[in-house]
Each structure stands twice: as structure tokens, then as C-alpha cells.
Amino acid sequence: MTTTTTELVDYDDATDRYDPVLGIEVHVELGTATKMFDGAPNIFAAEPNTAITPVSLGLPGSLPVVNGTAVEYAIRIGLALNCSIAETCRFARKQYFYPDLTKNFQTSQYDEPIAFDGWVDVELEDGEIVRVEIERAHMEEDAGKNTHVGGATGRIQGATHSLVDYNRAGVPLVEIVTRPIEGTGKRAPEVAAAYVRTLRDIFRTLDVSEARMERGNVRADVNVSLRPTPESPLGTRTETKNVNSFRAIDRTVHFEISRQAGILDAGGTVIQETRHFHEDTGSTSSGRVKSDAEDYRYFPEPDLVPVAPSREWVEEIRNALPELPAARRRRLLGEWGFSDLEMRDVQNAGALDLIEQTVAAGASAQSARKWWMGELARVAREQEVELEELTVTPAQIAELQGLVDGKKINDKIARKVLGSVLEGEGDPAAIVEAEGLAVVSDDSVLTAAVDQAIADNPDVVAKIQGGKVQAIGALIGPIMKATRGQADAGRVREIIMEKLGVQG
């Protein structure tokens, strides 16, 4: 029996009674200068249908040529994912109706991928490591972009017509396909999101892609199935297409587990199909019945010769690989002296690169962490953006901390200056100079402020002279107020103690 019930089962209940299994296909657009099989520029946000050639459009008589840099980037990715690199591989035609590929097939790899049999370790928020096995990583081309017009959501549902931009058609892609990811239980959504984040970080480190998910540089097809027990055969999977944020990946897995549990509880059958994620509701909806490999009628691409990377070239690429993110985190953990928990928080907040760049610009690791994980994290939450999207640079944070370390400003003023930096008013030192925010350390000015505070607060003075030295804080407050927060608090304290004849 087949059912289309939309009744959801509570997530915890669903994962108590069913065993979720994941499969994730990640597509990464490669940052080459030109497309996968022709000389059209590989650029983002060009005027529609301007970054094209006859090959991009599949016009009769046009012939493809493989992009050598794209092959190198694919090998880099395969090696970083502990894959074997094929001695020879070939392209195939994957055929079904593509409105956004005019030649009506996609040039991809099928049974002969360039990289296969790999793995990557994924670290979860609490430090648990999950090993995800990679079945293959293969090269292919991207399709064009459909823009659906006339609907309320910008999706095909409800649209009156669609426009096609072929600029993206032919952009180089590598698709990384996992083997079934089992044993994740209730943590399945977290594992899925963390896995894609791990790949995103690897792509950036390898410098093969900008890997900006909001631009579609990295997209994930998320496969989810349920089975009664870990010993049972795999259940029927659904594939939610083109999910392009970590939060959306997490929500997709949550929703599909609850939805499929509802179908199974009602005695229904999960349909093998593609689905679409809806950001506004966190739900998925049916796309089309999922095709199997034979439905695509793969056959070898007759216009392209096999790709046969020499073993010497592969080893040359391997030896030139940069330090990968996991090894880098271990190194920085030792260099910075953070606790494991502090480092995980930094990683989870997306602050690792920012802190490293701030340290490189001259700040200490602890002060860099204080700014990015404290005041700047608060601002990012308020603005609902990622840390890296804030309008402040690591160099500016290092400069700001340098002003604090040099006692030119105090922490309170530094926060005010940071606000001005975020408003685009300039660099910290220039703002301090322009607004006259430097700490007041002139003894004559401070002494006058201290004398006034002592005269205005005889009861506090009596307490201090009576042995309650901590009451000095009650005098420092009015002095800071009188100097707009710019008094050197340490020097103020010294002057008060000298005036009242007490020891700290």
C-alpha cells in the first residue's frame, strides 16, 4: 500500500523505533577560469546567457575538450578524501530531459570515476568522531539555472513561466558520493551537516573552490531511509535535492525521518523519489520518482578520450597538498593553548580562520578569541549573519587589541570603537584619533577628578580608610563617568590610595 500521509512522528519517538541511514551526494563547483569542456569563462553573476560558447549550448558540430585544471582539482579532492586515484577513467553521457542543458544529456562519469574508495573523519560538536566512507568522487558538468517567475516562492510550484540562464551550463563539478552512513541514530541530522561542513572546509583549504553555499558552489543531495533495526535491510530512500546550507541539511534529515516514520507507522510505503526542501517551513515536498542508473541510459562519451593521470603527476599533486583542516586544528590547538572545548566552540562558530588571521596580524590567540567569540559573536547573532560576513577584518581586530595592549584605550572604549568600525567609519586608530577617545593618563587631570570624587563621597572615603579597600570601586565609577570612560582606571586607583593613605 502507498500513502501520501503528511502526519509527522515526533523525532525522538521516530529514532527510538527506527534506524536512520544516510547517503549524501555533495556537488562542488570548481574554481577554474573556464568551464569543464570549453573555453567559456567560469564566472558568477554575469549577465544571463553571456558566458557561453557553442559547446556550452551543445550546438551541432561543437566538440568538447577536457579542462586539465579541473582534472587536477578533482585529484586534489580525491587525495584529500583518502581515495584511490584511477589510472584511467572516462566520461559518459547521462541522458534524461534537462531543460537547462540544451544538448539534453549531462557529461558525467558513471562506472569509471576519477577517485574512489575513500573516507573522511567528521568531528561533531562534542568532539565525537564519525568516519564517513566515500564510494567515489567523479567529474561532471553543471546545468544551467532556471528562474521561475510568477509564483510567491520563486519555486516551480505556482510559477507562470520559467527563464533559463545557460551561463552555469558546463561549469566544472566534482560530485562526492558516500556509502550508506549507518549507526548515527538521533545524531543523524548533526552528522549530515557536520559532514558537509567538513567537505566545505577541505575544498577551501585545497583552493579548488570558493565553496560559498549561498552561491550554490556547494550543494548537497540528502538521502534518508529508515529501517526497523540496524540488522534489517536498508529501507527505501528519498533524495532531497540541492540543499545549500548546513541548517537546511540538518532540518531536511529531521523532517524526512519524522515524515517517513509517519508513513511506515500508517502501514504505507515510502516512495523512492526526489524531494525539495522548503526553507520557510523546514519541510520537504515531492519532486519526481527517482530514476535508477539504467534509466539514464549511460554510455561512453564518444567525443572525449579517457583521462589517464600518470602516477608521477598524482604523487606530485599529493606532495603539494596543503595542511588539511583536521591536522591544522590539532596544530593550532597546541600553539594557541586553547582547551579542547574552546577549540570546538571556535570551530563550530566558524571563527578558526578569523582567529588565525587575527593572530597573524599581531594579536594574541586569547585576545583574538575573546573578540570573535564574544562581542563579535553577539553582533553576528543580532544581525543574523555568519561571523565572516561582519564588516570588520582580522587586521582591524588586531589593531584594536594593540590599542588596548598599549593602554591607549580601555576595554570599554574598545567596544565603542568596534561599533564604529562595524558602522564603516574607518580603522580603530583613526577612529580613536578622530573622536578623541584615547585614555586619559595625565596625572593633573586624573588628580582633579579624584579630588572631586573624594569630596563628593565622604561616606565611601570613611569605609576605605576604615579598611574596606574594595570600596574604592565606588569612587572609580564617578571618575570614569566624569572622564567619559577614558580615565586610566589603574592609575586612578593608585592616586586614590595615595590620597587616602591606604595600601592595596
Image (spheres, rainbow, N blue to C red):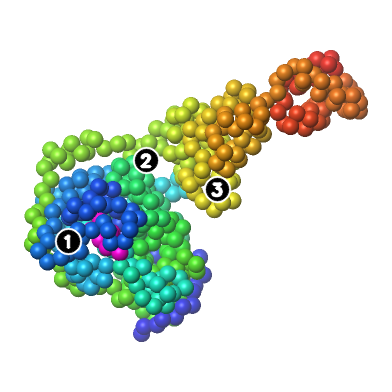
Cβ atoms under marks 2 and 1 closer than 8 Å: no
Q: Position of residue 269 (x, y in %)?
A: 36, 79
Q: Position of residue 13 (x, y in %)?
A: 50, 68
Q: Is residue 167 part of the magenta span, yes or no?
A: yes
C-alpha separation, residue under disc 2 versus residue under disc 1: 43 Å
Looking at the rendered image, the quarter that the C terminus falls into is top right
Question: Which disc number belongs to residue 54?
Answer: 1
Vertical placement of residue 132 versus 299, above or below: above
Horizontal relation, residue 305 to residue 52: left or right: left
Mark 1 or mark 3, which is nearer to you?
Answer: 1
Nearer to me, 2 or 469: 469
Q: Report which residue position mark 3 lands on.
A: 380
Residue in view at x 42 percent, y 69 percent: 154
Element marked by disc 1: loop
Of pointers 1 and 3, the one earlier in the residue sequence:
1
Foreground residue among 144 and 128? 144
Q: Are marks 1 and 3 in contact (CB under 8 Å)?
A: no
- In front here: 433 or 279? 433
Q: Residues within 10 Å of mark 1 (few under 14, many from 20)?
A: some
Against 378, residue 402 (above or below) is above
Residue visible at 57% across and 38% down in the picture: 425
Quadrant containing the N terminus in the rendered view: bottom left
Q: Amino acid type of disc 1?
A: Pro
Report the span colored magenta: 165-171
Question: Which x, y percent locates residue 351?
Answer: 48, 41
Mark linked to residue 326? 2
The label number, if any, that marks residue 95 in the structure image: none
Left or right placement of residue 280 versus residue 446 in this view: left
Q: Is residue 316 magenta?
A: no
How far apart, in angstroms, are the residues tagged by discs 2 and 3? 25 Å
Is disc 2 placed on a helix, strand or loop? helix
